[in-house]
Structures are given as C-alpha cells and as structure tokens.
Amino acid sequence: MADTAWQQCINPDCAKKYDLMEVLHRCGECGELLDVQYDWDQLPVPGSLEFFEGRWATRGNPVDFSGVWRFRELIPFASVAQLVTIGEGQTLLRKAPNVAEYAGHSPEKLYLQYEGLNPTGSFKDNGMAGAFTHAGMVGAKVVACASTGNTSAAVAAFAAAQRGIRAVVFIGSGKIALGKLSQALDYGALTIEIDGDFDDAMARVQEVSRSEGIYLMNSLNPFRLEGQKAIMYRILEGLKWEPPDWIIVPGGNLGNSSAFGKAYMELMDLGLVKRVPRLAVINAAGANTLTSIYNTVGVRWDKGRYDREKVDAFYSELDAGGIRAHTVASAIEINRPVNLSKCLRALEVMDGVTREITDQAIMDAKAVIARSGIGCEPASAATVAGLKCLREEGVIGPDETVAAVLTGHHLKAPEATIAYHSKEGAGLVAAIGIEKAAFGNRPVKVKNNINDILRALRESEGVL
Ligand SMILES: *Cc1c(COP(=O)(O)O)cnc(C)c1O
Ligand SMILES: [Zn+2]
C-alpha cells in the first residue's frame, strides 16, 4: 500500500507529502491539516457503487460485515489483514414522515441516518475503525484523545477489543454526558478529567501526545476521517446509490462534515456519482464558531487560500472576551473546531451552508425525533432543528431529498432527556438551560391503588 497511499498537506501552496507510516498531527512545514491521498490509477476501484452490494452475501467475514470496510476499495490505505473492526457501521437510513412535518418538509423526503446503532452508540466508531487500523500499522501501544464523550467511548472500546493497546482519554470536568463517561470507565480507559473544558482538553492532549509519542485519536487524525467517509457511502446505499439533495450534520470539531466533503470529492473524481448533495452544517448557538466565521466574517475555502488572518483574529476575540462554548448539546460544545479548514473545503465542494440553532430548538427537535421511534442525543437533533430553520428560510425546498445524520444514541445523555420530560419553569432552566418543553412527557405519580391508577389512565389522552 505504501506507494499508492500517502499523507499530504491540504494547503495547495505547500502540499507536502508524508509517508503513510509517519505519525503526525499536522503538516510539519506549514501547520495545516493532512489528508490521506491515493494514487487511484494504481488501485482496483470498482466501476460502480453497486459492486458493494455483493459484500452482503459474505457478511460472515468481519471486514465485509463492517459498515466501513465493506467499502474498503474507497478507503485503500491498508491491506485486508491489517483492518481493525468491532462491527461498526450497521446503521439504518429511515424515512421519518412525522419529523419531516415538524420541520415543515415533505413527509416522504426526509431520511434519518441513525448512527446511534454503532457498537458504542455514536458515529465515532466509523472513524475509529480507520484510526485503529493505522495505529496497528505503525505499532502504537498507547492511544489518546480529548473528548466531549463519544470519542472517548469509541477509543476505549476499540482499545479494549485490541490486545496490547492502552487508551487514555482526556475530558473536561463536569462536561461529559453520563452515558459516555460510564462507557469510558467500563471499557477500561485511563480517564483523565481536566479542570477545564473540551478546548482545554484538546490542547493538552496534543501536547502530551507530541512529547510522549502517544498515538492521537482525535479527528485531526486523517485516518479517522477516512473511516467516517463510509457514512456517505451507506446513505447512498440506502438511497439505491442516488445522492440526496441535502446532507445535514451537526458541527462540533467538524470532522464529520470534513469527511463527507472528501468522500464526495473522491466519488466525483472516480466517476462513481453524477452529482454532489449540498451540505448543511448546524452549530449550537452557544458554540457557533463555524457559523460566525462562515456567515458573519465571510471566510471561504477559496481553493485552499482561505483568509487565515481573519480566522486568527476571530479566535483572538474569543480569547479576549473570555468566551467559552456553552450548549446542552455537549457533543458539539466546542469553540475551536480543529477541522475548520477542511470543513471550509467541504462547504465549497458541497455548495454548503451553515446555521446556528438554540438549545430550545435542539431539545424540542430531539423529543419529536424520539416520537418517531428513533432516540438520539441532543447534538444529533440539531440536524432536524437546522432543517426546520432552512425550510423556513426557503433555502431547502419542500421536495428536496434530505438525509440528516443522527450522530449519537439517546441513552448517551439520559440526564438531558429526563430533565426535559420531568422539569418545568426555573427547574428546567437550571437543568438544561431551556424555558419550556413543548413535547414534554411527564411521568404520572399515583398512589398504589387501582382507583387512582384507573383515574390516571382515564385522564390521559388515548388510553381508555
Ligand atoms: C462528535 C459528535 C458530533 C460532532 O461531530 P464533529 O465531527 O466533531 O463535528 C456530533 N454529534 C455527536 C453525537 C458526536 O459524538
Ligand atoms: Zn503544509
């Protein structure tokens, strides 16, 4: 594989290449992010995407079962023997007419890509299949990440499933949803709670991994993003290989949106799709760096020559104002998205837009999604809240096909769900920072006797 795949700086004025086996976080010359690049002409690329349907017949083979590696010809940096999988990517693309109606969209035109079905309950497993494969290739013994929660759960699980790999996860103290913390602990990762938030943890883990030679598992790692391309392949598969008109994804560290852009750049180059969906990346209003930089400051990828000074100036202002990210959607509570530049590239390639939505809109959308039988965590619901907003603006047309990526499972953050359904007024504000639960479903407390129970049943809608 060594001569058909390599790492390369995404800055077109640098474009320095690095060997596949080097462990780097950024370009050593210019500091930009790195891509994994391929010499497609030397690689066996299938003539059409239908080829991959054949893998269903051989799903007894773990790498054909994997929702990432059954597309391995599109992620060709390792040999089959090197591929690491824990059964990631058995996810579902499902129509959600009720959710579509809530968002003001045509009932038949909204699909939810439910990544909560991954082994650790979030899309992060797709990326870890890629990154752990690379970690194995370079012989890493210790791996680390900073995390708002789901990355740590995925790293911890993959490390536990490999022999001889130790995981260290850095989290901001008090900033992690309970489901996620319980996973990291149970899978046996050394869990370091830093007295700070995600942005602090991210800065520290980079220092530690550089100085101690620990393999970094954050989405700075280009091999992780290679695995996350597979989410786009599975959405295509769910739509019989016809690209949707729109992909909607929440934006945190912007790894997912970046991976989606790269997937479509390659699919177009390879002639495997005829058109590219548009991309909508949704921030929480309390963690809106992308939206500010893209919509307010007006920075564009500009074929790689984006205005780095304007980005730096934006961060200087954040620092000067002491502004920290704050949202109920803890998975996207990030003010310094490490993949900002790659996301700008994705927005260019996919003719993208970005919006920010309130925590109130997120929590209401989450309850609506759950009532269609799919439980997701707050960050994931930002997609449906974003769709509602883009429908109101008319940016997304009523009959356009939309695939919204529900990034994580709702059992990840039960405390937010329970607060939404059981508190009101000041208690609700104090718990999750929103004023009302429009779709709240309060538990009914009754005495332990049949008459009281029957009365409660009669007083509820549609029971007796
Ligand atoms: C990590 C995560 C996100 C953010 O994805 P990025 O790739 O960092 O933008 C969104 N939702 C959930 C549930 C996550 O775990
Ligand atoms: Zn460079």
Image (tube, rainbow, N blue to C red):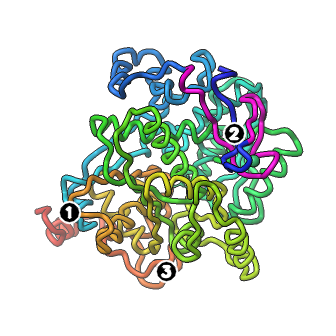
State the mark number for residue 8: 2
Q: Residue at x 51, y 64 (%)?
A: 329
Percent of width and height locating residue 292: 56, 73
Image region (quadrant) for ligand 1: bottom right
What secondary structure is the stretch in magenta mostly built from? Answer: loop
Label 1 to label 3, Cα distance in Å?
Answer: 35 Å
Element assignment for label 2: strand
Q: Earlier in the sequence, mark 1 or mark 3?
A: 3
Magenta highlight on residue 178: no
Q: Which residues are magenta?
A: 16-42
Please give the label number shown on residue 57: none
Residue positioned 59% across, 23% down in the render: 83
Q: Is residue 375 visible?
A: no
Which one is nearer the viewer's eye here, 321 or 327? Answer: 321
Along the polypeptide, which appears first: circle 2 or circle 3? 2
Check whether the beta carbons of the residues at disc 2 and disc 3 lie within 8 A of each other.
no
Give the answer, above or below, for where 184 lies relative to 47: below
The residue tagged 1 is 450
Whether residue 249 is visible to the viewer of this picture, yes or no, is yes
Q: Nearer the viewer, mark 2 or mark 3?
A: 2
Q: Earlier in the sequence, mark 1 or mark 2?
A: 2
**Which residue is at 67% across, 73% downward?**
324
Residue 89 occupies quadrant: top left
| Residue extending furthest toward the right | 211
Give the secondary structure at mark 3. Answer: helix
Asked whether, in this view, residue 443 is left or right of residue 291, the answer is: left
- Are the residues flagged by discs 1 and 2 in contact, CB closer than 8 Å? no
- Whole-number angstrom distance, CA of label 1 to CA of label 2: 70 Å
